[in-house]
Image (cartoon, helix red, strand yellow):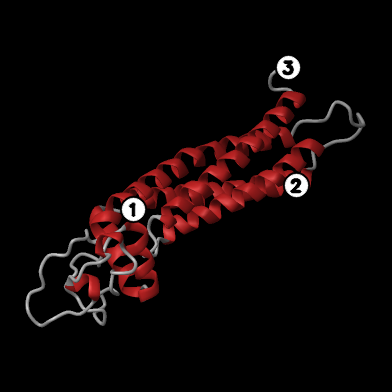
Amino acid sequence: MVCGGFACSRHSLIILNVIYIIVSLILISVAAYGRAVAVVTSLTLVGSLIACGVLLFLIALVGLVGAAKHNQVLLFFYMIILFILFLLQFSLACACLAVNADQKDALVEQGWRMSSNMTRSEVQAQFNCCGFKQTQFPQSDPLGHPPCDVSSDCCKGKTDQCCTGQYTNGTSPPCPCKSCFDVLQPLIYNAFSVTGGLGLFFSFTEIIGVWLTIRYRNQKDPTSNPSAYL
């Protein structure tokens, strides 16, 4: 098999699409982890990367069939959609990496304000925290929280105001639990960095796929009819 020949291009494209399937599963799992650790946030960027991973998986299957059969129609649509996916994934990955600390904190706070008390209770139970940044807000406040006595280990059996949800007009004593913002902040920062970094790295492999597909489409199958042309 001559490097750069028809067979070499065919096998290279098949191997590349198998790699794309693996990459798509990695993107989906990492981005899904980012959403899991940020239950209360509205991470549209991370969710979009999950969609990119699913789309890459489906496109890779089309690429496998097109490469195996040297189907011009499948390879053409595969090439176009893969290039569009590269642009989308590259933009989203850069956006994830470009979000600064203040913007990430604002996303978390916005997510907490929009979350239901049931979601807040789940977060408090899952991460063993209580409240958002400050625990003296009553449940009716947008930054308030439901009682933590049932949902959080650090509040079980305790009568602190943050645990019972019974706030007075005076200054409330310190809560025995960490705030959910302090617990979630490093996890959310890490989710943005890992998801953006992986998305940026893998997006460049898609350019290789586009170039390889263009070359493969313009090569004639030596086993086909000699009078046929592409």
The residue at the point 72 percent across, 33 percent down is 216
Residue 4 occupies quadrant: top right
Q: Report, in whole angstroms, how far the alpha carbon at label 2 lies from the one at label 3.
A: 25 Å
Q: Report, in whole angstroms, how far the alpha carbon at label 1 lies from the one at label 3.
A: 49 Å
Instruction: Give the structural element (helix, strand or loop) at label 3.
Output: loop
The residue at the point 51 percent across, 46 percent down is 27
Q: Decide if residue 64 is on the left or right side of residue 127.
A: right
The residue at the point 28 percent across, 73 percent down is 147
Of the pair 202 and 28, the residue shown nearer to us: 28
Earlier-in-chain disc, 2 versus 1: 2
Q: Does residue 19 sit above or below 6 in this rendering?
A: below
Earlier-in-chain disc, 1 versus 3: 3
Amino acid type at circle 1 is Ile
Q: Decide if residue 68 is on the left or right side of residue 91.
A: right
Earlier-in-chain disc, 2 versus 3: 3
Which quarter shows the N terminus? Answer: top right
Q: Nearer the viewer, mark 1 or mark 3?
A: 1
The numbered mark at residue 188 is: 1
Q: Does residue 177 sit above or below 140 in this rendering?
A: above
Q: Decide if residue 137 is on the left or right side of residue 115.
A: left
Residue 207 occupies quadrant: top right
**Numbered circles on residues, count:** 3
Q: Which residue is mark 2?
A: 74
Q: Which residue is mark 3?
A: 2
Could you say where residue 221 lies in the image, as x and y percent from the top left? 83, 30
Whether the residues at callouts 2 and 3 have beta carbons within 8 Å, the answer is: no
Could you say where residue 65 lies in the image, as x and y percent from the top left? 77, 42
Amino acid type at circle 3 is Val
Residue at the farthest front position: 157
Amino acid type at circle 2 is Leu
Whether the residues at callouts 1 and 3 have beta carbons within 8 Å, the answer is: no
The residue at the point 39 percent across, 62 percent down is 39
